[in-house]
Image (spheres, rainbow, N blue to C red):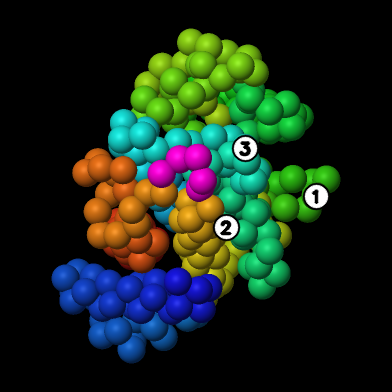
């Protein structure tokens, strides 16, 4: 699935679900809704909250249905998965890094994404300054933090990154470079940090932020599928209609992305309608 088709697919899905929600919630007709939303402004805090929810759902699906289930069937995942001699897929944190990298390449959407912690495996991901201060507060109240980064002139949001699957806990506890080896399910392991240069966005700009994230997820998963085709020492997983829970296999990118799209679109539209 190329970039254009991916964006078109999700735009159609978003539009279709918007019509459904309009009917169910007795909202105005789609044409009238479009006139309202086209002129509406969302605070950057509201926009960050929407894309953060998208990220939570997509990463949870990848972590549990791909990594967690895949490991049980023999699939391998590694932090150095992109190296030629490593025959594995990206760990959840690396999946997010791939998404963040893809978003950065999109010059039309100035959205930034970063995953950090006070106990990171890589030193470069350790929070400093204002982020470190706010993350300390987050450990106490588990709430998102919003602030303006004066140095970089960026509106910034931090959302708790919770260990929601056994794969997250075991990977961090057993890593040779870990600085903390007693993580438990439900612990806040870090925070996803989002940045944007404006304090508010239009409906179109919010949609562009959502599409930038989803396209990043699409391209990163496709990159993983492409990597499996180069395996020589390990069996190449079957790519088809089934998920790892059913065997040494992976869903086709379109199936994985449809699942992400259906899950996130419902949550996203609920959030937008509430706003």
Label 1 sits on a secondary structure element that is: loop
- Spatial CA distance of label 2 from label 1 is 16 Å
Mark 2 or 1 closer to N-term? 2
Quadrant of the image containing the C terminus: bottom left
**Residue drawn at 53 percent across, 73 percent down:** 3
Asked if 227 appears above or below 272 in the picture, the reply is: above
Asked if 19 appears above or below 216 in the picture, the reply is: below
Where is residue 222 drawn, in percent x and y?
48, 60
Q: Which stretch is magenta?
A: 231-235
Instruction: In the rendered structure, find residue 80 and report the number of the disc placed on it.
Output: 3
Where is residue 129 drawn, in percent x and y?
76, 29
Residue lying at the far right in this picture: please name it: 151
Query: Secondary structure of the magenta portion, mostly?
Result: loop
Nearer to us in this view, 164 or 43: 164
Label 3 sits on a secondary structure element that is: loop
Front label number (2 vs 1): 1
**Residue drawn at 83 percent across, 45 percent down:** 151
**Residue drawn at 39 percent across, 83 percent down:** 34
On the image, numbered disc 2 is attached to which residue? 44
On the image, numbered disc 1 is attached to which residue? 152
Mark 1 or 3 closer to N-term? 3
Nearer to us in this view, 14 or 152: 14
């Amino acid at each position: 699935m190329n970039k254009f088709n991916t964006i078109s697919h999700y735009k159609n899905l978003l539009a279709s679900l918007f019509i459904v929600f309009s009917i169910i919630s007795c909202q105005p007709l789609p044409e009238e809704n479009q006139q309202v939303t086209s002129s509406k402004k969302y605070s950057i805090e509201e926009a960050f909250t929407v894309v953060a929810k998208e990220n939570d759902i997509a990463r949870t699906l990848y972590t549990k249905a791909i990594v967690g289930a895949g490991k049980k069937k023999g699939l391998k995942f590694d932090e150095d998965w992109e190296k030629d001699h490593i025959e594995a897929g990206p760990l959840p944190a690396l999946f997010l890094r791939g998404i963040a990298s893809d978003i950065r390449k999109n010059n039309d959407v100035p959205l930034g994404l970063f995953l950090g912690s006070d106990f990171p495996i890589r030193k470069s991901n350790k929070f400093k300054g204002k982020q470190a201060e706010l993350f300390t507060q987050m450990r106490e109240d588990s709430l998102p933090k919003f602030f303006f980064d004066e140095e970089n002139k960026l509106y910034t949001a931090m959302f708790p990154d919770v260990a929601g699957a056994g794969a997250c806990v075991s990977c961090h506890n057993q890593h040779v470079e870990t600085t903390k080896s007693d993580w438990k399910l439900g612990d806040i392991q870090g925070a996803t940090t989002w940045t944007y240069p404006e304090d508010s966005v239009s409906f179109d700009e919010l949609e562009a932020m959502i599409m930038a994230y989803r396209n990043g997820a699409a391209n990163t998963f496709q990159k993983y599928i492409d990597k499996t085709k180069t395996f020589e020492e390990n069996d190449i997983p079957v790519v088809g209609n089934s998920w790892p829970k059913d065997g040494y296999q992976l869903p086709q990118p379109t199936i994985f992305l449809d699942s992400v799209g259906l899950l996130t679109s419902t949550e996203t539209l609920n959030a937008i309608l509430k706003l």
